[in-house]
Image (tube, grey):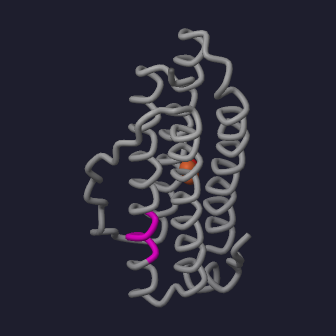
Amino acid sequence: MALISEELNKAFNAQIKEELDSGYLYLGMSIWLKEHNFENLANWYWIQAKEEFEHAEKFWKYIIETGGTVELLELKKPKSDWKSVEEILKAGLAHEQYITNKITELWKLAEKLKELQPRSLLQWFINEQIEEEANATALIEIHVAYKNDMLFDRHVHREDD
Ligand code: FEO
Protein backbone atom coordinates (compact mmCIF):
# COMPACT_ATOMS: atom_id res chain seq x y z
CA MET A 1 0.00 0.00 0.00
CA ALA A 2 1.25 3.46 -0.86
CA LEU A 3 2.44 5.70 1.98
CA ILE A 4 0.98 8.71 0.22
CA SER A 5 -2.80 9.07 0.14
CA GLU A 6 -4.60 9.50 -3.17
CA GLU A 7 -5.72 12.98 -2.18
CA LEU A 8 -2.23 14.19 -1.33
CA ASN A 9 -0.80 12.42 -4.39
CA LYS A 10 -3.22 14.41 -6.56
CA ALA A 11 -2.34 17.67 -4.81
CA PHE A 12 1.40 16.99 -5.21
CA ASN A 13 0.92 16.31 -8.93
CA ALA A 14 -0.83 19.69 -9.15
CA GLN A 15 2.10 21.28 -7.32
CA ILE A 16 4.58 19.74 -9.80
CA LYS A 17 2.68 21.64 -12.47
CA GLU A 18 2.78 24.85 -10.39
CA GLU A 19 6.55 24.57 -10.01
CA LEU A 20 7.03 23.85 -13.72
CA ASP A 21 4.68 26.74 -14.58
CA SER A 22 6.87 28.91 -12.35
CA GLY A 23 9.95 27.79 -14.23
CA TYR A 24 8.25 28.51 -17.54
CA LEU A 25 7.14 31.96 -16.33
CA TYR A 26 10.69 32.83 -15.25
CA LEU A 27 12.14 31.46 -18.48
CA GLY A 28 9.83 33.82 -20.39
CA MET A 29 10.94 36.73 -18.22
CA SER A 30 14.57 35.78 -18.77
CA ILE A 31 14.09 35.73 -22.54
CA TRP A 32 12.36 39.14 -22.56
CA LEU A 33 15.17 40.60 -20.43
CA LYS A 34 17.85 39.10 -22.66
CA GLU A 35 16.11 40.50 -25.74
CA HIS A 36 16.18 43.93 -24.09
CA ASN A 37 19.88 43.64 -23.10
CA PHE A 38 19.38 43.24 -19.36
CA GLU A 39 22.01 40.51 -19.21
CA ASN A 40 22.39 40.11 -15.45
CA LEU A 41 18.70 40.17 -14.74
CA ALA A 42 18.13 37.68 -17.56
CA ASN A 43 20.68 35.42 -15.88
CA TRP A 44 18.98 35.92 -12.49
CA TYR A 45 15.63 34.71 -13.85
CA TRP A 46 17.22 31.87 -15.82
CA ILE A 47 18.78 30.54 -12.61
CA GLN A 48 15.40 31.01 -10.94
CA ALA A 49 13.73 29.02 -13.73
CA LYS A 50 16.15 26.12 -13.22
CA GLU A 51 15.55 26.23 -9.47
CA GLU A 52 11.82 25.78 -10.09
CA PHE A 53 12.51 22.58 -12.02
CA GLU A 54 14.44 21.35 -8.97
CA HIS A 55 11.42 22.20 -6.82
CA ALA A 56 9.21 20.10 -9.11
CA GLU A 57 11.76 17.28 -8.81
CA LYS A 58 11.41 17.23 -5.01
CA PHE A 59 7.67 16.55 -5.36
CA TRP A 60 7.87 13.87 -8.05
CA LYS A 61 10.67 12.07 -6.22
CA TYR A 62 8.61 12.10 -3.03
CA ILE A 63 5.59 10.63 -4.84
CA ILE A 64 7.70 7.80 -6.28
CA GLU A 65 9.41 7.09 -2.94
CA THR A 66 6.06 6.79 -1.20
CA GLY A 67 4.55 4.49 -3.82
CA GLY A 68 2.28 7.04 -5.48
CA THR A 69 1.74 7.85 -9.14
CA VAL A 70 3.30 10.84 -10.86
CA GLU A 71 1.07 12.49 -13.43
CA LEU A 72 2.43 15.37 -15.46
CA LEU A 73 -0.31 17.89 -16.19
CA GLU A 74 -0.56 20.36 -19.04
CA LEU A 75 1.49 23.52 -18.49
CA LYS A 76 0.13 27.04 -18.69
CA LYS A 77 1.34 29.32 -21.51
CA PRO A 78 3.31 31.99 -19.65
CA LYS A 79 2.80 35.71 -20.12
CA SER A 80 5.38 37.09 -22.57
CA ASP A 81 4.20 40.61 -23.46
CA TRP A 82 6.11 42.34 -20.67
CA LYS A 83 6.18 46.13 -20.74
CA SER A 84 9.02 46.91 -18.35
CA VAL A 85 11.57 45.62 -15.86
CA GLU A 86 9.35 46.95 -13.06
CA GLU A 87 6.39 44.93 -14.30
CA ILE A 88 8.51 41.75 -14.32
CA LEU A 89 9.86 42.34 -10.81
CA LYS A 90 6.37 42.93 -9.40
CA ALA A 91 4.96 39.91 -11.22
CA GLY A 92 7.81 37.82 -9.79
CA LEU A 93 6.88 38.76 -6.23
CA ALA A 94 3.15 38.28 -6.83
CA HIS A 95 3.88 34.84 -8.27
CA GLU A 96 5.97 33.80 -5.27
CA GLN A 97 3.18 34.94 -2.94
CA TYR A 98 0.79 32.78 -4.96
CA ILE A 99 3.15 29.79 -4.60
CA THR A 100 3.50 30.40 -0.85
CA ASN A 101 -0.29 30.06 -0.59
CA LYS A 102 -0.16 26.82 -2.56
CA ILE A 103 2.47 25.38 -0.21
CA THR A 104 0.46 26.46 2.82
CA GLU A 105 -2.59 24.69 1.37
CA LEU A 106 -0.51 21.50 0.95
CA TRP A 107 0.60 21.68 4.58
CA LYS A 108 -3.01 22.11 5.72
CA LEU A 109 -4.15 19.23 3.53
CA ALA A 110 -1.47 16.90 4.95
CA GLU A 111 -2.54 17.94 8.46
CA LYS A 112 -6.20 17.29 7.66
CA LEU A 113 -5.31 13.85 6.28
CA LYS A 114 -3.06 13.21 9.30
CA GLU A 115 -0.16 12.37 6.99
CA LEU A 116 3.07 13.05 8.84
CA GLN A 117 5.50 11.72 6.24
CA PRO A 118 5.61 14.82 3.99
CA ARG A 119 6.20 17.21 6.90
CA SER A 120 9.94 17.66 6.39
CA LEU A 121 9.46 18.10 2.64
CA LEU A 122 6.74 20.71 3.14
CA GLN A 123 8.70 22.44 5.91
CA TRP A 124 11.58 22.77 3.44
CA PHE A 125 9.20 24.48 1.00
CA ILE A 126 7.79 26.77 3.69
CA ASN A 127 11.34 27.93 4.47
CA GLU A 128 12.18 28.19 0.78
CA GLN A 129 9.17 30.43 0.17
CA ILE A 130 10.35 32.84 2.86
CA GLU A 131 13.61 33.12 0.91
CA GLU A 132 11.84 33.36 -2.47
CA GLU A 133 9.62 36.22 -1.33
CA ALA A 134 12.54 37.99 0.37
CA ASN A 135 14.62 37.77 -2.82
CA ALA A 136 11.79 39.07 -5.00
CA THR A 137 11.11 41.93 -2.54
CA ALA A 138 14.80 42.85 -2.41
CA LEU A 139 14.97 43.07 -6.20
CA ILE A 140 12.03 45.51 -6.22
CA GLU A 141 13.56 47.67 -3.48
CA ILE A 142 17.00 47.80 -5.11
CA HIS A 143 15.41 48.61 -8.47
CA VAL A 144 13.57 51.55 -6.89
CA ALA A 145 16.82 52.79 -5.32
CA TYR A 146 18.70 52.73 -8.64
CA LYS A 147 15.97 54.62 -10.55
CA ASN A 148 17.57 53.38 -13.79
CA ASP A 149 17.00 49.97 -15.38
CA MET A 150 20.45 49.58 -16.93
CA LEU A 151 22.33 50.66 -13.79
CA PHE A 152 20.15 48.31 -11.78
CA ASP A 153 20.93 45.48 -14.18
CA ARG A 154 24.65 46.07 -13.71
CA HIS A 155 24.19 45.67 -9.96
CA VAL A 156 22.30 42.35 -10.18
CA HIS A 157 24.46 39.30 -9.61
CA ARG A 158 23.53 35.67 -9.15
CA GLU A 159 25.36 32.38 -9.61
CA ASP A 160 24.04 28.84 -9.77
CA ASP A 161 23.95 27.27 -6.31
FE1 FEO B 1 9.19 27.01 -6.35
FE2 FEO B 1 9.77 30.02 -6.59
O1 FEO B 1 8.81 28.66 -5.80
* Placement of 141 over or under 120, stated as above or below: below
What main secondary structure does the magenta stretch of the protein show?
A: helix
Is 48 part of what is drawn in magenta? no
Residue in the foreground of this view, choosing between 27 and 8: 8
* Residue that sits furthest to the bottom in the current view: 37
Q: Which residues are magenta?
A: 26-30
Left or right of residue 23, residue 117 in this image: right
Left or right of residue 79, residue 122 in this image: right
Image coords of residue 130 (percent x, y): 70, 42
Q: Residue at x 73, y 32 (%)?
A: 120
Give the quarter of the figure containing the C terminus.
bottom right
Residue in the foreground of this view, choosing between 3 and 15: 3
Image coords of residue 18 (percent x, y): 42, 45
Image coords of residue 5 (percent x, y): 48, 20
Is 29 part of what is drawn in magenta? yes
Q: Residue at x 67, y 36 (%)?
A: 121
Q: Residue at x 62, y 65 (%)?
A: 144
Image coords of residue 75 (percent x, y): 29, 53
